[in-house]
Image: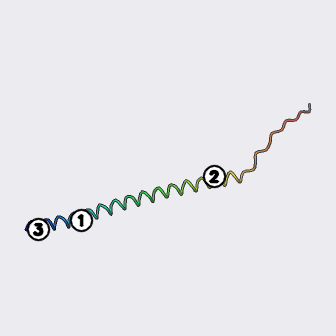
Amino acid sequence: MTLLNLAQAWTRSWAQQSQQHARRNAMIALTECTQRRAEREEVERYLAERGAARAARPAPREVTVSLHA
């Protein structure tokens, strides 16, 4: 192999490895974003359920004391 052929082979190999590395990074980032979105939606759902349960409860009754003996 000539020096030019070696340089071309190395360049081709580097480009492929770089592309694979970039794709892997993108997949990891997408997975992280998906997990964060799922967690955020779970928290939103929990808070909405708590708010609905709180709104459905009757208002606390006022405590009265009789002053008649």
In the displayed orientation, state which residue is furthest to the left: 2
Binning the other alpha carbons within 10 Å of mark 2 as few (below 14), some (14 to 19) or many (20 upward) gives few
Q: Is residue 14 left or right of residue 46?
A: left
Image coordinates of residue 2 in percent, x first then y, are 7, 68
Q: Which residue is mark 1?
A: 15
Image coordinates of residue 12 in percent, x first then y, are 20, 67
Which residue type carries mark 2?
Arg
Which residue type carries mark 1?
Ala
Query: From the image, which quarter does the N terminus lie in?
Result: bottom left
Front tag of 2 and 1 = 1
Q: CA distance from mark 2 to mark 1?
A: 53 Å
Q: CA distance from mark 3 to mark 2?
A: 69 Å
Q: Which residue is mark 3?
A: 4
Q: Is residue 57 left or right of residue 40?
A: right
Q: Cβ–Cβ below 8 Å for labels 1 and 3?
A: no
Q: Earlier in the sequence, mark 3 or mark 2?
A: 3
Binning the other alpha carbons within 10 Å of mark 3 as few (below 14), some (14 to 19) or many (20 upward) gives few
**Residue in the foreground of this view, choosing between 61 and 2:** 2
Q: Which residue is mark 2?
A: 50
Q: Secondary structure at mark 3?
A: helix
Q: Secondary structure at mark 2?
A: helix
